[in-house]
Image (spheres, rainbow, N blue to C red):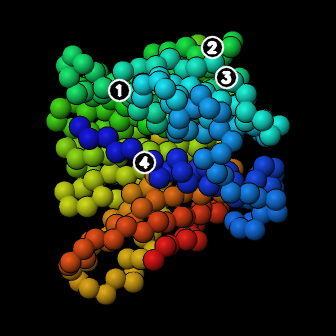
Amino acid sequence: MVIIILAAAVVATVAVIASFGVGDRSPGGPPASLANIRGAVPVNLSRGLPGAMKSGQLVSCPGRACVLVGSGTGLSETDLVARLFESAQWKDLPSPNGLRSVQLQGLSCTTTSTCVLTGYYFTTSPKGLTRGFAEVLGNGRWTLTRLPVPRSMSSSLDSVSCVSSTWCMAMGTDWTGSANQVFATIWNGTSRRLVPVPLPSGAWGGAQAQATGVSCVTASWCMAVGFYSTHTIAGPLVERWSARRWGLASAPTIVHAARSRRTSEGTELRLGAVSCVSSTWCAVTGVNSVAGALESTDRAELAILSGRSWSTVLGAS
């Protein structure tokens, strides 16, 4: 099984935090503007980070503070550290539990002292398979918790969104050896349960499918995005959590598909991250791959869901 790690989505998340600022959002609506936010400053990861942190990989900002999780200076890649940026200062947080060959995928904090961290690690026996994991920050320490995953050869927990310290939705991927599936797991602070996630009828079970991002507004409404594969191309995956179940939702169109002039070109859109401020306004990022006769080109896409319709506000050429 090959699990795609969308490092670009993490970088994009940091950039969005820097551009939007804090508190620049009307209640129940989108940010006041997608550009020119007064007082916005670029995030420079080469300065200001504590000396004990080598790389910041995931960020989540509850209110006016941000929690950053990454690897530490002088430590192995499997040793994790966490830092809090609050009141223009970096502060120490308890370090998450290190795991062998760990890959961090998702982080969601509802306060500066309550977070859920998800990802996967490679097993040593049998060698090369993956197992999804989750850690919960509470009571001043990180605790590994057993979020349920399907019984399969490989699994990962790819994204997580928490609306409170006692309710989180995590999206995962598992490989049975013959089929690739997307699943969801709900954690309410005490109990955990698996929730099925449907794939489009054209999805090929032997190919990759992944829910790479999830954003929950309440415990009764979430949006998850990612991609699925058919026998020939990859298509955008959009799921909506409503009425206590996941269901397929309409996906944004590929803005550059209509501009393709060569019949030999094919286009495919993989969605990577989502952020919702209400059940009627979400922003989704993705990568649009155009396969030409001589070479392929990747273009960034940013789609906005306003009400019931999608619009593409950025399609880099």
Query: Nearer the N terminus, badge 3 or badge 4?
Result: 4
| Residue assigned mark 2 | 141
Residue 299, given in percent of the width and then of the height, sits at 42, 69
- Mark closer to the observer (2, 3): 3
Q: Can residue 248 be seen in this view?
A: no
| Residue assigned mark 4 | 6
Crowding at dot 4, Cα within 10 Å, few <14 / some 14-19 / many 20+, comes out as: some
Give amino acid for label 1. Answer: Ser
- The image quadrant where one finds the N terminus is top left
| Residue assigned mark 1 | 101
Residue at x 81%, y 50% (from the top left corner): 23
Query: Nearer the N terminus, badge 4 or badge 2?
Result: 4
Residue at x 78%, y 63% (from the top left corner): 37
State how far apart marks 3 and 4 are (Cα): 25 Å
Query: Nearer the N terminus, badge 1 or badge 4?
Result: 4
Q: What is the secondary structure assignment of the residue under circle 4? A: loop
Q: What is the secondary structure assignment of the residue under circle 3? A: loop
Give amino acid for label 4. Answer: Leu
The mark found on residue 93 in the picture is: 3
For the residues bearing labels 1 and 3, Cβ distance under 8 angstroms: no
Note whether 129 is above or below 260 in the view shown: above
Q: Which of 44 and 192 is in front in this view?
A: 44
State how far apart marks 1 and 3 are (Cα): 22 Å
Residue 225, given in percent of the width and then of the height, sits at 47, 49
Give amino acid for label 2. Answer: Arg
Left or right, 296 with reference to 43: left
State how far apart marks 1 and 4 are (Cα): 17 Å
